[in-house]
Amino acid sequence: MIVTDATFLGKLHLMDFVDRIASYAPVPAGGAAVANCFCLAVALVYKVVIFESERTVQASPVGSNLMMLKKELEILLRDAEKLVDEDSEAYLNFSRSRRMGDTAQMNQHFNDIIDVSMKIMEKSDVAYEWIRQLHRVAPQQMNTHLLVASELLMGAINGTVHIVRDNLDSIRVYEKRDNYLKRISELHASYIQRHREILDILSGAPEEPAPNVHRMQPSRKE
């Protein structure tokens, strides 16, 4: 279980990761950096929950829901940490199968690369929703953390889009590639809009009142 910033930083070995990025090696690279950016965003949201959990009586409706959110974010953060390794593993497997000329394996590992990228985008959407929900109950002084987390999430999404587009160059079936590109462009546009909405909310723009602020859970899309 993640308890403090110190244990979080120790777990990620952040400076070791930076040294590995800045090395003469194919991985970790852009994909892992994007996943790590997402980790930092979730960690900041987690920080807000920790502070609010300490401030709020746990027996209250808000307090109990904050404890639930804390557990959800711990799961989300662990998933994000896994994505850092999954990205590097998928790239190495893809490169190996391409050198061997194994088309079937190459296609499978290519799908794994795309899958990691899509997971980052999907989980970023969940994190954005938690930020929106937290804004309703967190004090004003916590807004800076939520704003920075929002910007880190958007950075992770933008980076993911660049990586996916670059990887799509490997697809020789142009119709399939164009369909992928269209889909990623639509997703990117929707996330840009969501990011703007979150920034407006955090900056004090009026928001539709929540039916019940004590029931903090991400909205589920059909």
Image (cartoon, rainbow, N blue to C red):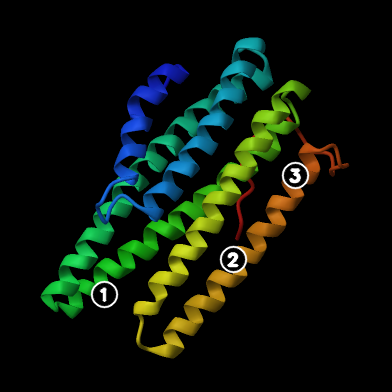
Q: Residues within 10 Å of mark 3 (few under 14, many from 20)?
A: some
Secondary structure found at label 2: helix
Position of residue 192 in the picture relative to residue 179 (left or right): right
Percent across and percent down for residue 210 are: 79, 38
Using the rendered view, name the quadrant where residue 132 is placed: top right
**In terms of sequence position, does the residue under pointer 3 or pointer 2 come before the other?**
2
The residue positioned farthest toward the left in the image shown: 100
Q: Amino acid at mark 1?
A: Asn
Percent across and percent down for residue 198 are: 73, 45
Q: Amino acid at mark 3?
A: Leu
Instruction: List the residue tagged with mark 2.
Output: 187
Instruction: List the residue tagged with mark 3.
Output: 199
Position of residue 114 in the picture relative to residue 89 (left or right): right
Instruction: List the residue tagged with mark 1.
Output: 107
**In terms of sequence position, does the residue under pointer 3 or pointer 1 come before the other?**
1
Q: Are marks 3 and 1 in contact (CB under 8 Å)?
A: no
* Depth order, front residue of 54/80: 80
The Cα atoms of the two marked residues, 3 and 1, are separated by 39 Å
